[in-house]
Image (cartoon, helix red, strand yellow):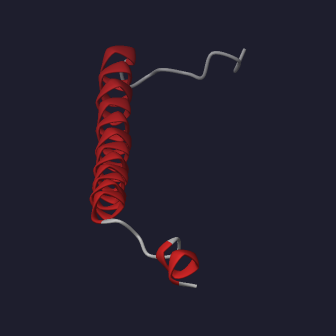
Amino acid sequence: MAKALFGHVVAPRDLRIAEEIASLRSRVARLESENATLRAERDAVIARELLSMAGADAEPALAR
């Protein structure tokens, strides 16, 4: 019975690996969030630049 119970106990090495995986998943989530924020900021800058180049009397391309 002791051998059966031992199989259900997590080894310290496995705990370290699980902690590292959780840490890496958290880091990936933070980096994905930062990436989405930077992409949104970049898109906003590009949109402002395009609008400034178009001028005040610009029409949509399919208006005519």
Name the quadrant of the N terminus: bottom right
Identify the residue shown where x is 37% and y is 20%: 50
Where does residue 56 sit, x and y in percent of width and height? Answer: 38, 25
Q: In this view, does 10 lie above or below 46?
A: below
Where does residue 34 sit, x and y in percent of width and height? Answer: 28, 45
Where does residue 33 sit, x and y in percent of width and height? Answer: 35, 49
Q: Is residue 15 above or below residue 17?
A: below
**Foreground pick, 49 / 23:** 23
Identify the residue shown where x is 69% and y is 21%: 63
Q: Say which quarter of the image contains residue 44.
A: top left
**Foreground pick, 36 / 2:** 2
Q: Which residue lies furthest to the bottom in this view?
A: 1
Identify the residue shown where x is 31% and y is 30%: 42
Q: Say which quarter of the image contains residue 22.
A: bottom left
**Foreground pick, 53 / 9:** 9
Identify the residue shown where x is 39% and y is 16%: 54
Name the quadrant of the C terminus: top right
Where does residue 36 sit, x and y in percent of width and height? Answer: 38, 42
How many discs mark residues in the rendered view? 0
Q: Is residue 8 above or below residue 28?
A: below
Q: Is residue 41 above or below residue 55?
A: below
**Foreground pick, 19 / 37:** 19
